Amino acid sequence: MRVVLQTWTSAQVRAAEQPLLAAGVPLMERAAFALHVHTAAALRELRGGVAGARVVVLVGPGNNGGDALYAGALLARRGVAVHAVLTATRAHEAGLAALLRAGGRAVQLAEPVDEVAALAAGADVVLDGVLGIGADGSGLRGVSGALVDAIVARGRPYVVAVDLPSGLGVDDGRRDGVVLDADLTVTFGAAKPCLLLPPGARAAGRVVLVDLGLDPAGAPEVVRLDPSDVAALWPVPAPDAHKYTRGVLGVVAGSRAYQGAAVLTTGAAVRAGVGMVRYLGDAGDAVVAAHPEVVVGHGRVQAWVFGPGVSPDDAGQRRRIEYAFEHVLERGEAAVVDAGALELLPPHVGPHAVLTPHAGELARVLTLRGEQVDRAGVEAEPLRWARRAHELTGATVLLKGPVTVVAGAHGAVYAQADAPAWLSTAGAGDVLAGLLGALLAGRVDDVHDDPSLAAALAATAALVHGRAAHRANPDGPISARAVADALPGTIAEVLAG
Ligand SMILES: NC(=O)C1=CN([C@@H]2O[C@H](COP(=O)(O)OP(=O)(O)OC[C@H]3O[C@@H](n4cnc5c(N)ncnc54)[C@H](O)[C@@H]3O)[C@@H](O)[C@H]2O)[C@@H](O)CC1
Ligand SMILES: [K+]
């Protein structure tokens, strides 16, 4: 099975289909055949065999319904009792005829939906072929929506989504209105962004990509890095490296009242393998006690981390950050801008500044720049708002969440889902900031040559951070310090491939 790591927009997919359709390549037949194979495999796993199973096919008005109907026909020929539920006034004619010829049955959906909902809820598998890449992203409306609600209320059966869970925002992962969550998504030709992007991606379950011979043009819209990508991105020291060539990271974090943030940020940077860490602030004693490697005070640096544990009333740290913003970004030094530094960000910076907000903080960054959005709005459309913040500030934006979204220069977008939910704990963000700072310090010259590299490094940091959390304690509570402590081993592991 291929793991989905790159996705293309519906427009890119349609354009890639055109030459094949013009050449008479039977794309729908191929898609339907693969869909039937994966559905049969699910049936075997669920009930030990295919013949005698009950499958309900939810059929929408377009070709997505066509795929589902043809797959239903193939299943019917293997002895499956197949019921098609036609959710719209039109359905793919040839697909419907094929199903009926194979012995399947079809009902037109109408209110009340109870009887059909009971049929679907009692099926071994429901194939969701209501909407595919033609969906407008507003969820399932009218009687289709009522049916899905009624199925879920009865206890959702095993659901196979055809191409994508119907009703998701195909290119942006939006989940507005009713969507039927799937256990398995069989996606055709090229994976779609909604299969990686929050919040929609969770509705997809396991994703299987069916190769139809498509060759989409242009860069993929959304990318997910996997560990095999990290070696090419990590600043692995050359044999003749010394601490200054490996990068020096300046950290303005924490305060006398919030010493922990300074300790965690510097500790993560030290463990991520930077040449040297310089700390500026009032928590120097605690930092050096925890990490004797850290040097306190000014000096030449290549990259910075600003803001972890810096509170709005900390005049000293705010002054340092404001001063640094005036000088260091112009000098070309890279910076991670986190927590308390976010609201001090100048109006416009370059992609070598990487913002690391969570949804609430990003909403604040945006509202300070005239956008009308709150935390819930950011959570509903993380990609849209991360991109908007990139446009408005020029910075690379790493939006933290259950799936971390990164938007950077040249349209670079990453969606990383590496972290266990246990990682949502105090201090985890400080560790991420230190880790990312170390990466930027090691590759700042390359970031200037290719500004989109900052986004790739941010995604790398999210990947390593998430994997370090798994390494620290795979299935239970994790402290931020344990994540930092797990960094050296995690980095060695991913670099070993
Ligand atoms: N183009 C091709 O050759 C191929 C297409 N394939 C399948 O075709 C699908 C795309 O087919 P279509 O372009 O017909 O699009 P869909 O099957 O997604 O249907 C889109 C239609 O649904 C309606 N619609 C959109 N949003 C709605 C909403 N929220 N509520 C209710 N109705 C809504 C609109 O009338 C729209 O025309 C793909 O997802 C894939 O499953 C595959 O068979 C592979 C080959
Ligand atoms: K679908």
Image (tube, rainbow, N blue to C red):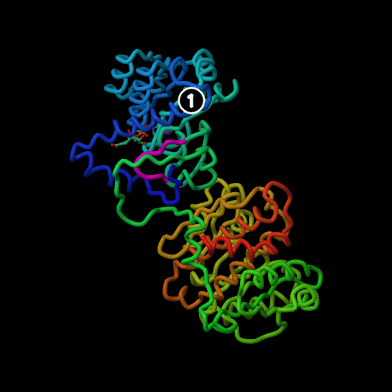
46 is higher (above) or lower (below) than 412? above
Q: Name, please, the residue furthest toward the left.
A: 23
128 to the left or right of 212: right
Q: Quadrant of ligand 2?
A: top left
Q: Is residue 95 visible?
A: yes
Q: Position of residue 344 (x, y in %)?
A: 63, 70
Picture quadrant where residue 301 is located: bottom right
Residue at label 1? Answer: 44
456 to the left or right of 64: right
Q: How many marks?
A: 1
Front residue of this view, candidates 145 and 287: 287
185 is higher (above) or lower (below) than 393? above
Q: Residue at x 43, y 26 (%)?
A: 40
186 in magenta: yes
377 to the left or right of 319: left
Front residue of this view, candidates 473 and 92: 473
Q: Name, please, the residue furthest toward the bottom.
A: 299
Q: Residue at x 58, y 48 (%)?
A: 379
Q: Is residue 388 visible?
A: no
Q: Position of residue 296 (x, y in %)?
A: 72, 82
Q: Residue at x 47, y 30 (%)?
A: 160
The residue type indicated by label 1 comes to Arg
Residues in magenta, as a range = 185-192
Q: Residues within 10 Å of mark 1 (few under 14, many from 20)?
A: some
